[in-house]
Image: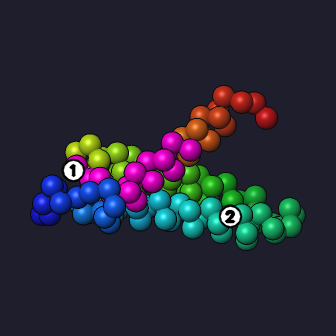
Amino acid sequence: MTDQSSSSFLQLPSTKTGWWAVGLAVTYAGMGIINTFVFMRLPEDAPWRQTLLPYYGILMVLCGLSAGVVALIAVMRNGERSWLVWLTIVQWVFTLALVIGEFLIAH
């Protein structure tokens, strides 16, 4: 177990929970980049696009939301103070706003 008093804002995460949060956030960002530059550039009539992309999008959003929840646990319960974990919480707020907006605003 690491000493929580040594955790500061400018250091890397010092807990496993903090590293999990950062890992999930990086996975979410990577999936978003793949979605933008690969999947969205494919033709609309690709036969697998209608079956694969909804699941990919749901998995991507769940990854982003879970990163924020794990980051909150790391900060509140484990005393994590790393800037990467706080950045993950900021990313979570934007993802949460995206999800809430999808349910509140009709298309």
Q: Quadrant of the N terminus?
A: bottom left
Secondary structure at badge 2 equals helix
Asked if residue 24 lies left or right of residue 4, the reply is: right
Of badges 1 and 2, nearer the viewer stands 1
* Residue 62 visible: no
| Residue at 16% over, 56% down | 4
Asked if residue 41 lies left or right of residue 36, the reply is: right
| Residue at 59% over, 65% down | 31
Magenta segment includes 83: yes
Q: What's under tag 1, amino acid-wise?
A: Asn
Q: Quadrant of residue 100?
A: top right
Decide: few, some or many residues near mark 2? Use Cα within 10 Å; few <14, some 14-19, many ≥20.
Answer: some
Decide: few, some or many residues near mark 1? Use Cα within 10 Å; few <14, some 14-19, many ≥20.
Answer: some
Q: Position of residue 75 (x, y in %)?
A: 29, 47
| Residue at 79% over, 35% down | 107
Q: What's under tag 2, amino acid-wise?
A: Asn
Q: Which residue is mark 2?
A: 35
The span shown in magenta is 79-94
Asked if residue 93 lies left or right of residue 20, the reply is: right
Q: Position of residue 85 (x, y in %)?
A: 38, 55
Which residue is outermost to the front?
10
Q: Which residue is mark 1?
A: 78
Asked if residue 23 lies left or right of residue 82, the reply is: right
Which sits earlier in the primary sequence, circle 1 or circle 2? 2
Secondary structure at badge 1 equals loop
